[in-house]
Amino acid sequence: MLDTTPRNDWTRPEIAALFDLPFADLIFRAQGVHRAVFDPNQVQISTLLSIKTGGCPEDCAYCPQSAHHQTGLKATKLMEFEEVMAQATAARAAGATRYCMGAAWRNPKNHELDQVCRMVEGVNALGMETCVTLGMLTAGQSRRLKEAGLDYYNHNIDTSEGYYGQVITTRGFADRLETLAHVREAGIAVCCGGIVGMGETRDDRVGMILTLATLPRHPESVPINLLTQIAGTRLHGIETLDTLELVRTIAAARIVMPRSMVRLSAGREGLSDEGQALCFLAGANSIFFGAKLLTAANPGEDRDTALFEKLKITPMPLAG
Ligand code: SAM
Ligand code: DTB
Ligand code: SF4
């Protein structure tokens, strides 16, 4: 029997060696791990909602919501509770089992956090798992979210520690790890991954996976985003990443974090059905469903429903 007990002592050479495997060998290994833990024909359906859009003080080079970029995006105030509930109810009807709410904040203020806590309670009451992504959190704010019943907190490391400074200057890699530690400490499940296709090297992709796989506990969810290039952002116009390199990154994540959900996140809109099928073969078992991510386009529900039918993939039911 294949041992799928999570390991936190992965080394850089071990992960680099996975990336360097012949493609068929890499996929075979990833499939072996995937099938030992999950039903390979089930994919989890999550839906995103931007509850506070744009005007963010951070300078993340990829992000259309940064106030440092002129992307034509209209900044909004925090969405009203009733509107969030209406959107969440529609997502549940479309099959979502996890609802993820994102705010373009550097960090939430306490009165804003109170409003988000009410949304978390409301969405939980609909019978979906809840996830929020609000930027940096203190230990106390993390505990407050846990008390409200939050299931997951999304906070990405985005890239390798070495490349990080090329992408974001307004907060450091260590700040990210600190927020992740607060979230873990509060007993909230962690959703943490990154972005590929930002001009990083394969070594950086290895480094990003290494950081995730050597956290004290693996994130329960690992979103792998392919950069969605938005006009007006600093990374717009950069050379696009070979899809096979995205597939290799997903396979490496699957192998080193065998029990985690690996989410093929942003960037599906630009992928072919064949490209996405390779990502599922490599062990991706979660997607965002619905025509919009936070602000960028995602495949429409019809296209995803057709893809699931072609591949005979069914939505993963909620555990328990
Ligand atoms: N402001 C919060 C933060 O950054 O922690 C939460 C929202 S932020 C939009 C969530 C994540 O979305 C980022 O960490 C990044 O990984 C991803 N993201 C944002 N823009 C993206 C893009 N254009 N392409 C791919 N991923 C993107
Ligand atoms: C994650 O890793 N990807 C999602 C979610 N976590 C919050 C966000 C993707 C954002 C893509 C760009 C946009 O829609 O603005
Ligand atoms: Fe702000 Fe988050 Fe966008 Fe960075 S990724 S600019 S923190 S909304």
Image (cartoon, helix red, strand yellow):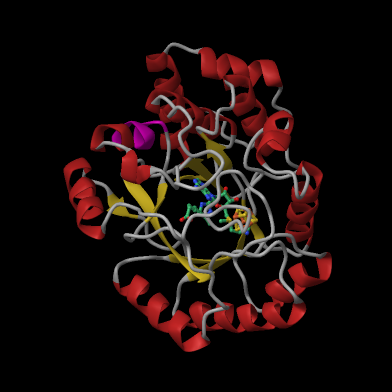
Residue pictured at 59% horizontal, 50% vertical? 220
Residues 243 and 90: in front is: 243
Could you say where residue 300 lies in the image, as x and y percent from the top left? Answer: 26, 57
Report whether residue 7 is seen: no
Residues 9 and 148: in front is: 148
Could you say where residue 191 lies in the image, as x and y percent from the top left? Answer: 60, 53
Could you say where residue 131 lies in the image, as x and y percent from the top left? Answer: 56, 65
**Which residue range is magenta in the image?**
277-282
Above or below residue 22? Residue 45 is below
What is the quadrant of residue 312 in the picture?
top left
What is the quadrant of residue 214 in the picture?
top right
Residue pictured at 41% horizontal, 31% vertical? 282
Report whether residue 274 is seen: yes
- 20 relative to 188 in the view: left or right: left
Which residue is most to the bottom?
Answer: 82
Above or below residue 109? Residue 4 is above
- 126 relative to 169 in the view: left or right: left
